[in-house]
């Protein structure tokens, strides 16, 4: 007879009635992390493809929404084909990605409320962004609507980054202290255990300047040459002026990131964090600085070269990379997490058979932090 894999802690004599879940549909932490990574990649691809629709002038390839023109599906002209493919594949892809992580989070054992909440936020983002895309078409690509659609897409990339980060680390207690599988304080100190106060506030300020970049960027786009259709409305600002504001915004953002790294470096050796935590933080920080440097270079180059479409696509992709690296750096500084979830993990998954080495866990979702290793 097969050994029970998910033996509730509550199966101990103290509480024998804890409900069991269907063992066939258990998602391991390692498998869930893969779902989260797939969701993040999907949202980045959707954002870049959306920009490609604009840059090929296909934004009004379908003049109506949800129908293309007369019927739901029409592939008459190349622009129509581009816009249709974008609507169908992006909408469907986003729904599948957000739906899968949500089901995965529900089935993940140990269950984690934070992961489920973040997955639901992704579903909400998709549900909001699909009609927003429709409104954008119905408003003839008004730049404010195009910009809002883009900003929501970037917000979802940020949320998916948090989801992936959290799913890569062990349990986070409600009180913010890292725990290992025994529910003890983790042997791996969380960075925030040491790096709190001014550095975390500076990091939050850095995120505000990043959010501002996500607004000043679409302001330049809404005044620039790539409207998505020749007849689309424009903001009407002088491109050199808004680009100056946008690039100044980048220097502020960069100044925050550099200052944080300098402060972290000065703290090294004075008190915690542990060397491992330091090297992780520097790795995250250097990744962010590299992303800003490349993105800034692309930004200046595209401005000097008259904003060619092929560079704009790189700039949009770079924006996603900057958001991901900035959010990861901020989480490295501020998030209270335990050790890393091992990449491999047992072979049980949503479709497979659970292995027997899964730790016994409490299946009561409200108290799933009471995890026990046999
Ligand atoms: C970390 C640095 C930067 C980030 C994160 C960033 C982000 C963005 C974003 C989000 C957009 C809007 C994209 C869209 O609406 O599809 C944008 C547009 C733009 N950015 Fe940047 N940007 C950065 C640096 C720069 C710099 C230094 C310049 C040059 C001075 C620049 C020039 C432009 C231009 C010209 C556009 C308009 C592109 C178009 O017409 O489609 N950017 N940027």
Image (cartoon, rainbow, N blue to C red):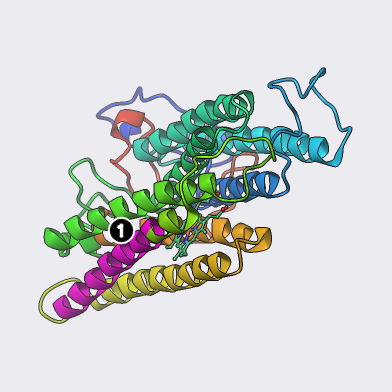
The reply, left or right, for residue 67 in relation to residue 224 is right
- Closest to the observer: 369 or 137? 137
The reply, left or right, for residue 352 in relation to residue 287 is right
Query: Which residue of the protein is positioned furthest toward the bottom in this rendering?
Result: 269
Q: Position of residue 341 (x, y in %)?
A: 42, 57
- Closest to the observer: 86 or 26? 86
Quarter holding residue 349:
top right
Which image quarter is the N terminus in? top right
Name the residue carrying label 1. Answer: 330
Q: Residue at x 64, y 44 (%)?
A: 50
The reply, left or right, for residue 46 in relation to residue 243 is right
Quarter holding residue 234:
top right
Kindly report the secondary structure that dominates the magenta region of the rendered protein. Answer: helix
The secondary structure type at the circle numbered 1 is helix
Please say if 193 is above or below 64: below
- Around disc 1, counting alpha carbons within 10 Å, would you say few (fewer than 14), some (14 to 19), or many (20 or more)? many
- Res. 221 in view: yes
Q: Please give the range of residues in magenta.
A: 245-268
């Amino acid at each position: 007879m097969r050994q029970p894999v998910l033996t509730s802690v509550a199966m101990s004599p103290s509480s024998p009635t804890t409900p069991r879940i269907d063992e066939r549909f258990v998602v391991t932490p390692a498998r869930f992390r893969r779902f989260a990574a797939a969701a993040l990649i999907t949202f980045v691809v959707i954002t870049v493809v959306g920009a490609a629709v604009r840059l090929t002038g296909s934004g009004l390839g379908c003049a109506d929404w949800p129908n293309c023109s007369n019927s739901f599906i029409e592939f008459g002209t190349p622009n129509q084909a581009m816009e249709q493919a974008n609507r169908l594949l992006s909408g469907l892809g986003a729904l599948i990605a957000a739906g899968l992580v949500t089901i995965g989070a529900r089935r993940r054992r140990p269950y984690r409320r934070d992961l489920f909440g973040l997955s639901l936020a992704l579903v909400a983002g998709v549900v909001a962004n699909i009609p927003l895309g429709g409104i954008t078409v119905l408003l003839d690509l008004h730049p404010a609507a195009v910009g809002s659609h883009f900003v929501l897409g970037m917000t979802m990339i940020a949320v998916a980054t948090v989801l992936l980060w959290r799913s890569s680390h062990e349990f986070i207690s409600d009180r913010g202290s890292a725990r290992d599988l025994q529910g003890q304080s983790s042997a791996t100190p969380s960075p925030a255990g040491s790096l709190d106060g001014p550095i975390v506030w500076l990091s939050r300020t850095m995120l505000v300047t990043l959010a501002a970049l996500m607004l000043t960027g679409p302001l330049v786009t809404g005044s620039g040459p790539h409207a998505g259709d020749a007849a689309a409305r424009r903001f009407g600002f002088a491109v050199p002026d808004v680009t100056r504001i946008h690039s100044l915004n980048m220097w502020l953002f960069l100044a925050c990131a550099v200052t944080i790294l300098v402060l972290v470096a000065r703290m090294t050796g004075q008190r915690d964090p542990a060397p491992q935590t330091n090297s992780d933080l520097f790795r995250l920080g250097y990744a962010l600085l590299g992303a800003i440097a490349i993105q800034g270079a692309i930004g200046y180059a595209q401005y000097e070269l008259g904003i060619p479409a092929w560079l704009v696509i790189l700039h949009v992709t770079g924006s996603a990379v900057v958001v991901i690296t900035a959010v990861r750096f901020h989480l490295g500084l501020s998030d209270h997490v335990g050790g890393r979830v091992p990449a491999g993990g047992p072979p049980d998954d949503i479709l497979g058979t659970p292995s027997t080495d899964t730790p016994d866990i409490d299946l009561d979702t409200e108290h799933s932090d009471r995890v026990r290793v046999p």
